[in-house]
Amino acid sequence: MKVVMQLRWLEQQFKYDGTQLRSLFGYLGYGLLGDSVVAWAGPCDIPPEHMVDGEDLNNDAKICGDLMVHMIIERFDCDLLFGVSMQRILASLAIDVLQELSPQSELSSKLYREGDDIFCDYKKISISVATKSPVSTLVHFAVNCVNTGTPVDTMCLQDFQVDIQMFAKHLMQNFIHEMQSIKDATHKVKWVK
């Protein structure tokens, strides 16, 4: 099967502050030419000048956490509508991965998605945003690894007893497989006259 996107797990932890959501993040930083998914763990603290979600800006939202697993997805052949769709696919796949990896089946059975966010018992687990650059569509998707440093009630990978790196790698692989499956589906239908 042809690889539709490249992926990279970064061993080094560093803070996500919104500046990483930029075109060619994967290529200029890590040599991933073309569509890519780059993931790492680190704190999160996004100042207003780097927020791209108008709703967050209007609400003077605070977006932060002491440790999250972050993903930057970049696609060069799609519009913002597809970018938002990717967010929702990621959220759904993240629930699948948590339910697969967590020994806390009673807890993980309560996971649900609202839009592009994941919740459990009304506690937030993820953050996400999609945007456009002049050359590509970008998504930042992140999941809490711990519950400290967050401005709202949260749940995290620690609650589900799921390893950070294992979660990230499973989610990236499942996401890339889903993107390839979507692309393949567009190649096997014939024209309707």
Image: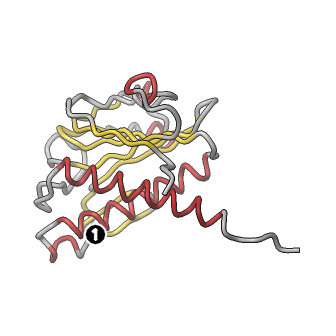
Q: Is residue 114 placed above or below 42 in the rendered structure?
A: below
Asked whether 59 or 39 is in front, the reply is 39
Residue at horizontal 47 percent and vertical 46 percent from the top: 5
The image shows residue 26 at horizontal and vertical percentages of: 43, 31
Q: Is 43 positioned to the left or the right of 21 in the image? A: left
Residue at horizontal 36 percent and vertical 27 percent from the top: 47
Identify the image quadrant of residue 118: bottom left
Residue at horizontal 26 percent and vertical 29 percent from the top: 15
Q: Residue under circle 1?
A: 111
Quadrant in which the C terminus appears: bottom right
Q: Is 49 positioned to the left or the right of 159 in the image? A: right
The image shows residue 192 at horizontal and vertical percentages of: 83, 74
Residue at horizontal 45 percent and vertical 40 percent from the top: 36
Look at label 1 and name its amino acid.
Leu
Identify the image quadrant of residue 29: top left
Residue farthest to the right? 193
Asked whether 127 or 31 is in front, the reply is 31
Q: Is residue 122 placed above or below 144 in the rendered structure?
A: below
